[in-house]
Amino acid sequence: MALAAVLLAGCDSQSAIPKDKLSTLVLSQKDMPSGFSEFYNGAQVRLDNQGTVRSDASRDGREGGWIARLRRDDSGQTQGPLVIESRADLFKDSGGARSDLAAYRVLFSRTSGSELKTVAVSGIGDEAVGITFTQPGSRPLRFYRIAWRYRNATASVLIEGFDGELSLNDAESLARKQETRMESAG
C-alpha cells in the first residue's frame, strides 16, 4: 500500500507543469487572428484577485500566476471578442488546482450582471466551469468566462463583446487554444 502511494505521488509530480513554464500558459498575440494587440502580459498582481475568494496569493500551495490582456485594434469591427483576458495559476500539485477551481465556482456564483447563467463547457481540461452575463447600456456587452483545471494548474478565459455578436463558441475556441499551450508545457 505504501509503495502504491509513492508510485502515485511520483506520477503526479512527473505530470506537473513546471513553474518556469508559467508565462507560456496564457494566450498571446500570436494566438489571435490579426487585429488584436496585447496591452498587458505579466505576473498577476494583488489587484487581479482583490476582494475575491481567490485573493490569497499563497492559497492551496499556489506557486504563481500569469495574466495576459488583449484588445481588438479596429473599433469598427464588432463581431466576436473585443477584449480578452487569459489567466493561469500554478500549484504544487493537482489538489491545489482542484481547490482553486472550486474557488472559481464560488466566484462565478457571486458574479453580478444581467442574464447571469451557467454555461455547459466540455472537452476542456480535466474539468471546467463557465458563465455568461450581460452589462446593460446603450449597447449591452456580453461576457463569457470559462475556468478549468489541467494537472497542477488552473486557467481562465474572459471575453467581452457586444451582445448578439459574441458566442460561447468564441470563448471555447480561445480556451482550447490556451489548453493546447498548457498541454505543451507539461
Image (spheres, rainbow, N blue to C red):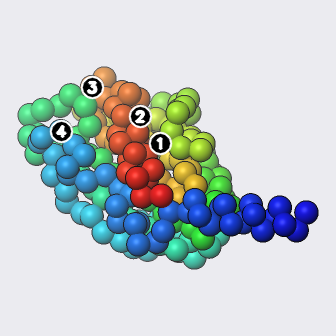
Q: Which residue is mark 2?
A: 172
114 relative position to 105: left or right: left
Q: Are marks 2 and 1 in contact (CB under 8 Å)?
A: yes
Q: Nearer the viewer, mark 1 or mark 3?
A: 1
The residue mark sitting in front, 4 or 3, is: 4
Residue 87 located left or right of residue 91: left
- Binning the other alpha carbons within 10 Å of mark 2 as few (below 14), some (14 to 19) or many (20 upward) gives many
Residue 33 as seen in the image, left or right of residue 166: left
Residue type at mark 4: give it: Pro
- Which residue is the site of mark 3? 165
- Looking at the picture, tell me which residue is in the foreground, 151 or 14: 14
Sequence-wise first label, 4 or 3: 4
Which numbered disc, 2 or 1, marks the residue that appears first in the sequence? 1
Q: Residue at x 40, y 41 (%)?
A: 175
Which amino acid type is marked by label 1? Answer: Ile
- For mark 1, give the secondary structure: strand
